[in-house]
Image (spheres, rainbow, N blue to C red):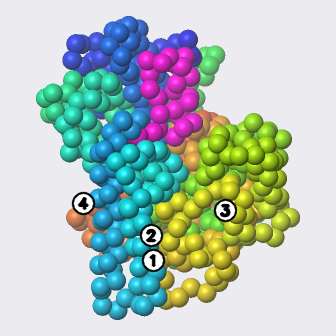
Amino acid sequence: MSRRIDSPDTPADLRLRELLEGDTPPCFVVNAGAGSGKTTSLVKALAHLRDAKGSQLRRQGQKVACITYTEVAAEEIHGEVDLDPVFHVSTIHSFLWTVVRPFRRDIALWVDRRIEGKIAALLEHNSKKGTRGSTITKNDALIARLEADRAALTPETTFTYGIGSRYARGVLGHDDVIKMVPELLMEKSLLRRLLAHQYPFVFVDESQDTFPSVVAALKAIAADPTCAISIGFLGDEMQQIYSTGIGSIPIEPDWAQIDKPENFRCPSMILEVINNIRGGVPGSLKQTGGRRDAVTGKTLLGDAKLFVLASTGDRDSQLQEVRAIMANSTTDSNWRVEDGSPSAPRVLVIEHRLAARRLGFEQIFASHHDRSTDRLKEGISEGTAWSIQPFVSYLTPLALAVRRGDSYAQMELVRANSPLDLERTPALASRLSSLSAATEEISNLMRPDSDATVRTLLSHALSSGLWALDDNFSPYEQLLNYAATHESVGDSVEHGVLARFFDCPARELLAYQSYLDEHSVFATHQGVKGAEFERVLVLLEDDAAVGNSFSYEKLFELRELSATDLDHISNGRESTLDRTRRLLYVVCSRAERSLAVALFTPSAMEAVSQVRKLGLFRPENVITF
């Protein structure tokens, strides 16, 4: 049995177990803050269902579904329940595809409507007054491609789930799956009933970051009188870090709510800080307890300091001084350890550009973040942008497999992603030999001393048969044929992003992959959700940010709120303050022993008194130098 399952029960664990024991368990929402052991509660609930109802579920050919946010989280949870096949543990995209995959006719009809809608949107764009001729020409080419895709689809088309959509090949990407399945669940009562029969229990982890359309579809199943299903959402609205997430899950009248206020991670000083941060949200959960000494059982005091520093100063020198103060205050010499050591403080940055600059992928980051769309800005930060998916899911792992000499991993990646049918290709040995040489070249093009661009890399992957353009990339195929350093005023925003991205050094892709895989001392709020570190150094640098999605100077009342901020607040819409407060909570709540937050602002000496008045940190722990 796992360590989590063997841990003592909390009141929330007992209450959840009680709910699940009935013949018709209700739907429920578990509200659990950072460090509360939410995953432990989830694993305990799964184990209880296995012990109490596993035999019955197996006899009826049913499973317990557990939806997580990442593949890593899915593997962790599945391992905690001993890989028992009575559980279906997967990401939301994979789960939705599993549900809809047998409904080939419904998928085909939806894809036909999807293509029709895209064509209609392009025609409407072309008809708008002022649309440039070059844009109309490009849109016409895309319309012709979509019409060809539509004509290629037949009732016999078998659809698969891939990185990006390629309709003519029957491939649907992440965006289409997340749009299609909730729509079909809302429309089709039969699909709702089949899902409920196959998965009478559905647990949704990190529910605050779940797409609203998915929540609405699951609620529709729960409300359908022909469906016997118990759906549980486990999350924390204060840890919503993706703009596409729903945040708080509205409770239905016949649902149960379970609060889990305990915090087992943070010492009392840090727990005090994160409760102060949560206190700015009316009705937010107040966390209790705190990290205890393993020997004495007493709650640890810990240390939490906020350093208000001049943004015009030498930041590296200032941060060295911060480390020195923390080392003396905590009598913990590891605060002085240089980056790269396992015992070094974990540096958490809010603005991804700082990590990109320090780790060596600033051009790739800038190509997607500057003069871009919100979707691509967020996507490059998270590694989910459609434009980066072929690299993080295929080409970069392929290069890394070549470097390790892992021929099996290379072949598995090629089999899964190459458009070639390797099982039926004549002269297979010759083909495999050429593909092996092609993968070697992929690795060479990403070497640290390589001058190759992303354009060169993609062109090689296409010409060698390692990769094929999906429907996201197809409209920008011409950019692969020339160095598009100048963007026309009439070009779309995404056209500009791709033009700049293709000009980026291919060698930056490995640094970017390392960042996503958390092989660096630097991390961001997205990369550390659920993680914990003994020593945490948080950098708050508004001047390093691009855009106005967050502002720590506004949160600390060092800058005036904008008219847009005030309008959003007065109308109950999400504001800069909401997003900023949540991010501060996420990063501060990672600390297990000691926490240092460095706020860079133009007038540090004048800002200290204002920051102390806010009371997020104890006045004596707000420091400047």
> For the C terminus, which image quadrant?
bottom right
Q: Is residue 202 magenta?
A: no
Q: Earlier in the sequence, mark 4 or mark 3?
A: 3
Q: Which mark is residue 52?
A: none
Q: Is residue 398 above or below residue 602?
A: above
Which x, y percent locates residue 334?
A: 76, 41
Q: Is residue 69 above or below residue 140?
A: above
Q: Residue at x 38, y 22 (%)?
A: 64
Residue named by callout 1 = 141
Please tell me in which quadrant of the rendered image residue 312 appears: bottom right
State the extent of the magenta-drawn residues as a range: 70-97
Q: Which mark is residue 145?
A: 2
- Asked whether residue 400 appears in the rendered view, the answer is no
Q: Which mark is residue 462?
A: 3
Comparing marks 4 and 3, which lies closer to the viewer?
A: 3
In this rendered view, identify the residue nearer to me: 157 or 226: 157
- Disc 2 + disc 1, Cβ < 8 Å: yes
Q: CA distance from mark 4 to mark 2?
A: 43 Å
> For the N terminus, which image quadrant?
top right
Please tell me in which quadrant of the rendered image residue 47 appears: top left
Q: Earlier in the sequence, mark 4 or mark 2?
A: 2
Q: Residues within 10 Å of mark 4 (few under 14, many from 20)?
A: few
Q: CA distance from mark 2 to mark 3?
A: 18 Å
Q: CA distance from mark 1 to mark 3?
A: 20 Å
